[in-house]
Image (cartoon, helix red, strand yellow):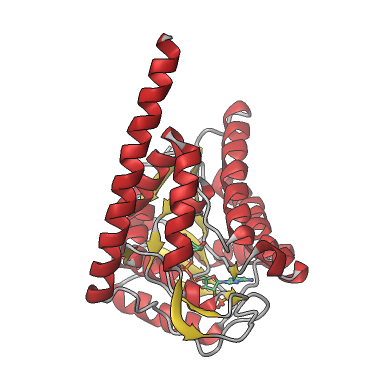
Amino acid sequence: MPLTRTLDDATVVITGASSGIGAATAYALARRGADVVLAARTEEALRRVAAHCRELGGQCLMVPTDVTEPEAVRQLAARAAAEFGRIDAWINNAAVSAVGLFDEIPVEEFRRVVTVNLLGAVYGTKAALPWLEAAGGGVLVNNASVLAEAAMPYQSAYNATKHGIRGLADTVRQELRVTGRGNISICTVLPATIDTPLFRHAANHTGHELTPPPPVYPPEVVAETIVRLLRRPRREAYAGGAARLIGLQWRLAPALAERLLGWYTARTQFGPGVRLDSSGNVFRPDAAAEPTGGWHGRRRQLVRMTAFGLAAAGTAVGTMAAMTRRSKAGRA
Ligand SMILES: NC(=O)c1ccc[n+]([C@@H]2O[C@H](COP(=O)([O-])OP(=O)(O)OC[C@H]3O[C@@H](n4cnc5c(N)ncnc54)[C@H](OP(=O)(O)O)[C@@H]3O)[C@@H](O)[C@H]2O)c1
């Protein structure tokens, strides 16, 4: 079920709202007159996002929150409801990443990525549900990734959490339906690569500068997908054409798609620069981080889009070959 009221009358809580997709979503909602509640760890960055939301016409409350602390997340919900009287939608968006081979990611860092990304969504969902129920219904959106469906080398911790978020969402959705609470919708967003500072924020154990595998889409693509889900909830929505294509290939010919995507992303996620080992923003916010990614440069995009196009065409041919083989085997 969609929101019980129009966006200009709704209260929406967003975690991870201090940069990237969270900030873009806050702006998209503020522009439509929604009351937005912004949560993340960095107060200064939240203040900047809140000021811009107010300029755009939305009412705004910022609540510095670490999503790894369940009581803090419960307090976030209580503060939002106390300020605006209700919560109509909740967006679990906060995440961190640790990039490196599985054997090279320290256990403590792996554990923290799981705690922020997966348990953060668990705490958010637990905090949100009673308020959505009290509002007579609402929408909870989990910003996962196409990596909730597919996989990418050097991203084991991140991939594992995103797969977990998808499973969590599917189960909670079933439970709400079988317990007569179908007026609360649970939606999962599966974005492609997005132009945010995520790759600069990430812990890095590769020895190389990290770059997002192209094609890279602007964060507004995800923000508008989330706005559409609040108006017309669906189980899942891709954001960015490449995510839709990857999802399709992964479903049709998973073994082949796994090989090709592994080959492609292993070659496109490292830049020429050398980097020392770093835990990025996994344990504490990155004070030097920029609010946007700056990866959307046209020349670089063009070169990489060509590479992605070739890889995608290869996968499509392979997918068709696999399907033909399967149907021949079925007929034999
Ligand atoms: N960028 C992509 O290519 C891409 C693709 C698919 C999906 N996504 C998903 O999109 C979402 C947003 O990521 P982004 O790309 O916008 O990256 P981002 O710019 O690095 O944003 C991550 C946000 O999470 C917050 N955060 C991190 N740890 C936190 C914690 N312990 N408690 C509360 N907030 C925390 C960060 O703020 P503080 O540091 O101030 O806490 C920041 O606001 C994530 O779920 C990510 O997995 C991104």
Q: Would residue 297 be seen by someone viewing this image from the given angle?
A: yes
Q: Quadrant of the C terminus?
A: top left
Q: Please indicate whether residue 82 sits to the left or right of residue 301 in the image.
A: right
| Residue at the farthest bottom position | 288
Q: How many marks?
A: 0
| Residue at the farthest top position | 332
Q: Nearer the viewer, residue 139 or 19?
A: 19
x and y, in percent, of residue 199 in the image: 49, 73
Q: Quadrant of the N terminus?
A: top left
Up/down of 301 relative to 165, above or below: below
Q: Please indicate whether residue 34 sits to the left or right of residue 97 in the image.
A: left
| Residue at the farthest right position | 107
When asked about the image quadrant of residue 98, the answer is bottom right
Up/down of 330 relative to 310, above or below: above
At a point 65% along the width and 66% down the height, the residue shown is 67
At a point 70% along the width and 62% down the height, the residue shown is 115
Q: Nearer the viewer, residue 249 or 141?
A: 249
Q: Nearer the viewer, residue 243 or 88?
A: 243
Q: Please indicate whether residue 38 sits to the left or right of residue 121 in the image.
A: left
x and y, in percent, of residue 300 in the image: 28, 74
At a point 62% along the width and 51% down the height, the residue shown is 125
Q: Please indicate whether residue 69 sits to the left or right of residue 151 in the image.
A: right
Q: Would residue 89 be seen by someone viewing this image from the given angle?
A: no
When asked about the image quadrant of residue 106, the answer is bottom right
x and y, in percent, of residue 154 in the image: 58, 63
x and y, in percent, of residue 165 in the image: 59, 49
At a point 36% along the width and 44% down the height, the residue shown is 315
Up/down of 153 relative to 318, above or below: below
